[in-house]
Amino acid sequence: MARMTDVREDRAHEETPGDAARWVIDSWTMTRREFARWARNPAGVLLALFFPVMMLVMFALFLGGSMTVAGGGDYTEFLVPGLLVLTMAFGLEGTMTAITRDLGRGVLDRFRSLPMAPTAVLVGRGIADLLESVVALLIVLAVGFALGWRWHGTLSAALGAVGLLLLLRAAMLACGIWLGLVVGRPELVMAVQILVWPVAFTSSAFASPESMPGWLGAVAEWNPMSATATAVRDLFGNPGVAGTSWAAEHALFLAVLWPVLLLVVACPMAAGRFRSLSR
Amino acid sequence: MVERGDPAVLVAGLRKSYGTKRALDGLDMTVARGTVHAILGPNGAGKSTLVRTLATLLRVQEGRVEVDGIDVVTRPRDVRRRIGLLGQHAALDEELSGRQNLELFGRLHHLGGRRAAARADELLERFGLSDAGGRPVSGYSGGMRRRLDLAASLIVDPGVLFLDEPTTGLDPRGRTEVWESVHSLVGGGTTVLLTTQYLEEADRLADLISVIDGGRVIAEGTADRLKTMVGGDRLDVIVTDPARLAEAAELLARLFGHPGGPDLDQLVKFDHSREADTRSGRVSVPVADRRGALARAVRALDGAGIEADDLALRRPTLDEVFLHLTGTTGADVDGAAGVLPDPDAPADSGPGAAGNVPTGPVGAPQGSG
């Protein structure tokens, strides 16, 4: 063998990056790991991105004709913000799957046995998942545009809408890391994949809560997904739900409050769970 | 700086419990530098808990633990810089290629991009994975995966390498591959601490074996010494007439045993529990010196007019070591035997196997690599 790489150099000079630098470098390394995974499996990424597009096309073209928006207006314009919210919410499964996969295969143990910043594993996951969600948002918006969706507000309002959507995704990210560490096995993510559907439909993503049975409509109005959907519709200038309930009137406030609440609860839970891996 | 005189691993009074369950119960152990040390024990004995504690994955509740002269409680990161860990399952990113995996772990060791890449190439070559290096790990065989896993735990040329059941779940060929790799490491002077459920594996790889049960070390020594504790080799005789089984057992015990000695006590215990099996007509006795043992047994049985269907000399099994050391064979040991059928078991030695000492699960070339 030719000249050996001097892997002992670090040890000889104890020349390792400082804590903050290490955290940044390791987080970036972990993010790049996800990029490499995408490059290795483009079909899987495309399939994941295709899913909300398929939903959008199905709802807009197959059901759209028979749907009327309770408050008046075009159903496709009502639907696109709802699907953007759905795309963010379904990110929960993606995060959970990735976490359980690393946990189950022992990859997480290997990371924890390395002299890296331990939280970089979670930070890298977060950055990669958020970037993927940005791409998914842009694709749904583009397809929505092709189907006739338009935005009627200002640019800053539109950017605010995107911000709210990513805030919801961030909340789902924290929940996904926490739940992934709790369930530990990829098979159990199936349960979440099934359960997100009734939660998604018990919201204003596809239909106005006004059109649902009274009690269900009340639940749907307070669903965090509804808050974000209603606020995003307002900011895009798209037709919204008909109701005049407190939740509908204060959608913007709730669209910030709900994800922040979820983050405040899920972040320490996820961190605690991560620490308890070494219990 | 680390003094050369420090042991590679020092464990003193290590305790760890989960609720009321004691996983480690005052474990003491020292591993000398440059040696291969095996931790042998059934599932649930505390093997993995010990290794995971040494590798900084589990917190120390009570006791002192030093790796490469460094306290794992106060300086875990410095320990992580000096160790390699091979967990029970291949800890690899299945979607990435072998090279990408090694580069990732190299970067996380802060080697930097260029050195991480160079190191990855070196390790791939060393473990015979250069050709497969560009392919995703998901297409690798079990043995290839384990070799890549081993390569990943050698990124920084660790002072101490921990192998947690390195061959569990591998087919015989994969097992041989891993054994050869470990052999080649030993040549390089790496200290290796490995856990195993298989006496055969400990026998093949380790300089010293610690047998642990119930979270503490119950015996320590070379493989030969441990086997001798059980009475060296064992002679299995299948008696044609089950009615004369007890007579045969007594005869053979007198022939090979030491009256009043510990071996006879053990033998008596065996006779009444499981070693003289009436249904199969089999009696099994420890034989301290295998030379001429078969001939002596044949003559003695002939002289007493006892007919035998089969006679075979074999090495003691892990079951027997455990029976001897703990007085029980845990159900887990039986479970392990289910995963890896023990070829030393008499059931596998057919007629004509007499005097044939089976060499182990695989006829692996010894000392290769």
Image (cartoon, coloured by chain):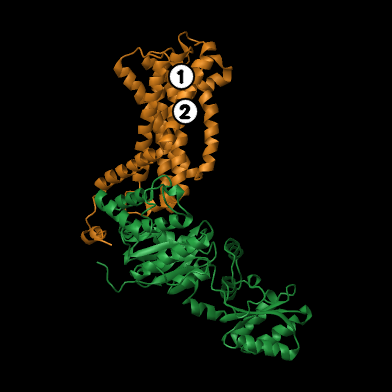
Element marked by disc 1? helix
Answer whether residue A1 is visible to the viewer in this image.
yes
Instruction: Give the residue type that dot 2 points to.
Output: Phe
Task: Give how far apart the Cα atoms at labels 1 and 2 are.
Answer: 29 Å
Q: Is residue B121 above or below residue A219?
A: below
Instruction: Give the residue type that dot 1 points to.
Output: Ala
Q: Chain of mark 1?
A: A
Q: Decide: few, some or many residues near mark 1? Use Cα within 10 Å; few <14, some 14-19, many ≥20.
A: many
According to the image, label 2 marks what residue?
A51
Answer whether residue A256 is visible to the viewer in this image.
no
For the N terminus of chain B, give its image quadrant: bottom left
Between A42 and B86, the residue placed more toward the observer is A42
Q: Is A197 on the left-hand or right-hand side of A271?
A: right
For the C terminus of chain B, give its image quadrant: bottom left
Q: Decide: few, some or many residues near mark 2? Use Cα within 10 Å; few <14, some 14-19, many ≥20.
A: some
Rendering colour (chain B)? green
How far from the left and from the top, in percent, is residue B121?
31, 54
How far from the left and from the top, in percent, is residue B90?
45, 54
Q: Is residue B273 above or below residue B103?
A: below
Q: Which mark is residue A247?
A: 1
Residue B149's quadrant in the figure?
A: bottom left
Q: Is B31 on the left-hand or right-hand side of B353?
A: left
Between B26 and A104, the residue placed more toward the observer is A104
Rendering colour (chain A)? orange
